[in-house]
Image (spheres, grey):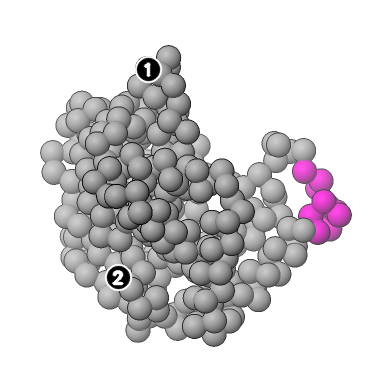
């Protein structure tokens, strides 16, 4: 339902469940860390049992992307994905509600010189962020070191949208609507770094097809388009929760070479290769629950889901 159809009064009964959810996020954000991890795993396990459609999407994605694994290994990976994303739910609450400076001594941030060099050149930078389960908290942790801009998709529910936007504005310099390409380009040209995530299926009109884990996937061309319009380097960023479930690693990779090349398929292939490289470090922490392969190269091909 479109955002304009929601009631204007934020206290309207339609929003009572929204306020309840916001209250729950505030509460869980302040839980002791071991309890937060345990509760997150519980949420993930519950979702594994009841969110049948999301489980199906995840199973298909794992089967397509990791054919070398046995069926038993694939099922274990699906379970690990749900547990990791359950923990991510509590991490989202922490990032939106709290000042995350209390986590600074738990962060290992390597290869920062790549972003430092890019910003020193005054051309700005395009940060290639990936949809890991820890992405929201990771963005907040990144904000302890750099205030960058971020592309933002407004939520349809205006009350929840205001809550999310207010929470993210604490950690980012400026939130830019995903449809405001001119605003994004202007900010990057002014020397700012912008966080952009191109790893989802946005449909045939804005994509080319390039391999992702060996499967042809609709891959958005906006990354190379932004690089071409701004002259800014594209820097991949890895963010992972470490196996101890209490510390985090952030790492910048060197800027993409010969990018953009002028060939959208070549560029999309390179971006997908880098994304795959980042995912393989901790593949269970990626958000495999979305339909990454919903758009097929031939519209007549049967869907994989």
Answer with left or right where residue 203 lies relative to residue 283: right
Say which quadrant the N terminus sits in: top right
Q: Which residue is mark 1?
A: 298
Q: Is residue 289 above or below residue 217?
A: below
Which of the numbered marks, if any, corresponds to residue 272?
none
Mark 2, secondary structure of its residue: strand
Q: Is residue 2 above or below residue 238?
A: above
Residue sitting at 33 percent across and 63 percent down?
239
Residue sitting at 20 percent across and 57 percent down?
253
Which of the numbered marks, if any, corresponds to residue 249?
2
Rendering coords of residue 51 (x, y %):
59, 51
66 and 209: which one is in front?
66
Q: Residue furthest right?
A: 13
3 is within the stretch colored magenta? no
Mark 1 nearby-residue class (10 Å; few <14, some 14–19, many ≥20): few
Q: Which mark is first along the chain, 2 or 1?
A: 2
Rendering coords of residue 190 (x, y %):
34, 49
Bounds of the magenta span? 6-16
Q: Is residue 98 above or below residue 43?
A: below
């Amino acid at each position: 339902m479109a955002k304009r159809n929601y009631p204007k009064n934020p206290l309207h009964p339609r929003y009572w469940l929204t306020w309840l959810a916001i209250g729950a996020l505030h509460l869980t954000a302040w839980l002791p860390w071991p309890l937060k991890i345990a509760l997150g795993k519980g949420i993930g396990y519950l979702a594994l049992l009841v969110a049948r459609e999301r489980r199906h999407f995840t199973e298909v994605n794992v089967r397509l992307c990791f054919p070398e694994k046995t069926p038993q290994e694939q099922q274990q990976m699906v379970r690990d994905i749900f547990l990791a994303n359950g923990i991510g739910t509590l991490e989202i609450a922490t990032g939106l509600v709290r000042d995350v400076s209390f986590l600074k001594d738990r962060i290992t941030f390597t290869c920062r010189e790549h972003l430092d060099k890019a910003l020193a050149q005054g051309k700005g930078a395009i940060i290639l962020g990936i949809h890991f389960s820890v992405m929201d908290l990771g963005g907040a942790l990144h904000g302890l070191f750099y205030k960058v801009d971020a592309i933002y998709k407004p939520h349809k529910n205006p009350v929840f949208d205001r809550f999310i936007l207010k929470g993210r504005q604490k950690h980012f310099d400026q939130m830019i609507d995903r449809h405001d390409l001119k605003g994004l380009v202007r900010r990057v040209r002014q020397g700012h770094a912008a966080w952009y995530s191109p790893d989802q299926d946005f449909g045939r009109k804005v994509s080319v097809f390039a391999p992702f884990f060996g499967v042809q996937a609709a891959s958005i061309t906006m990354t190379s388009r932004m690089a071409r319009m701004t002259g800014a380097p594209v820097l991949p960023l890895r963010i992972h929760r470490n196996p101890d479930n209490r510390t985090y690693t952030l790492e910048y990779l060197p800027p993409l070479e010969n990018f953009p090349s002028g060939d959208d398929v070549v560029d999309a292939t390179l971006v997908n290769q880098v994304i795959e490289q980042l995912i393989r470090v901790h593949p269970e922490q990626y958000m495999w629950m979305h339909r990454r392969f919903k758009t097929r190269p031939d519209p007549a091909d049967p869907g994989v889901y």
